[in-house]
């Protein structure tokens, strides 16, 4: 069983309605999700917690990447991670 775990993005989510005028910053937010998409690998983003930024609680996520045609493994590991996180 091989699952790769990465951050989903380089930082917390943007605030609702926040405008990002820097195209490089916007591009870098997707830097971890692009490789799995381009390789055709199944991947899922799962909430992993929160961080305080400028007085607001913003969500963080992790990405799980599974081998080709192993969506079953991806969902199994994701489900177990969510069970552990809920404790």
Image: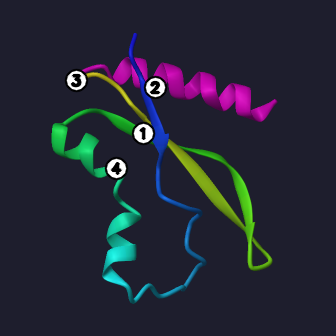
Pointer 4 with pointer 3, Cβ within 8 A: no
Task: Give 54 or 69, whichever is nearer the viewer.
Answer: 54
Task: Decide whether the magenta segment is chiefly helix, strand or loop.
Answer: helix
* Secondary structure under the numbered disc 3 in the rendered image: loop
Q: Please give the residue where the numbered disc 1 appears in the rendered image.
A: 44
Outermost residue to the top: 1
Marked residue nearer the N-terminal end (1 or 4): 4
Q: In x, y percent, where is residue 24?
A: 32, 76
> Where on the picture, by quarter, is residue 53?
bottom right
Tell whether position 80 is magenta: yes
Q: From the image, state whether disc 1 or disc 4 is nearer to you.
A: 4
Q: From the image, state whether disc 4 or disc 2 is nearer to you.
A: 4
Badge 2 density bin: few <14, some 14–19, many ≥20, Cα 10 Å: some
Q: Please give the residue where the numbered disc 4 appears in the rendered image.
A: 33
Q: Please give the residue where the numbered disc 2 appears in the rendered image.
A: 75
> Where on the picture, by quarter, is residue 69?
top left
Gap in Å between the C-alphas at discs 3 and 1?
13 Å
Quadrant showing the C terminus: top right
Q: Please give the residue where the numbered disc 3 appears in the rendered image.
A: 68
Gap in Å between the C-alphas at discs 4 and 3?
15 Å
Gap in Å between the C-alphas at discs 1 and 4?
9 Å
The magenta span reads 69-87
Q: Vertical placement of 81 versus 60: above or below?
A: above
Gap in Å between the C-alphas at discs 3 and 2?
13 Å
Q: Vertical placement of 31 versus 75: above or below?
A: below
Q: Residue at x 71, y 56 (%)?
A: 50
Quadrant showing the N terminus: top left
């Amino acid at each position: 069983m091989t699952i790769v775990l990465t951050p989903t993005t380089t930082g917390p989510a943007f605030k609702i309605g926040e405008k990002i005028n820097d195209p490089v910053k916007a591009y870098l937010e997707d830097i971890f999700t692009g490789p799995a998409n381009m390789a055709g690998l199944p991947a899922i983003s799962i909430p992993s917690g929160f961080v305080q930024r400028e007085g607001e609680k913003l969500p963080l996520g992790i990405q799980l990447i599974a081998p080709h045609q192993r969506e079953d493994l991806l969902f199994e590991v994701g489900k177990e991670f969510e069970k552990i996180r809920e404790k």
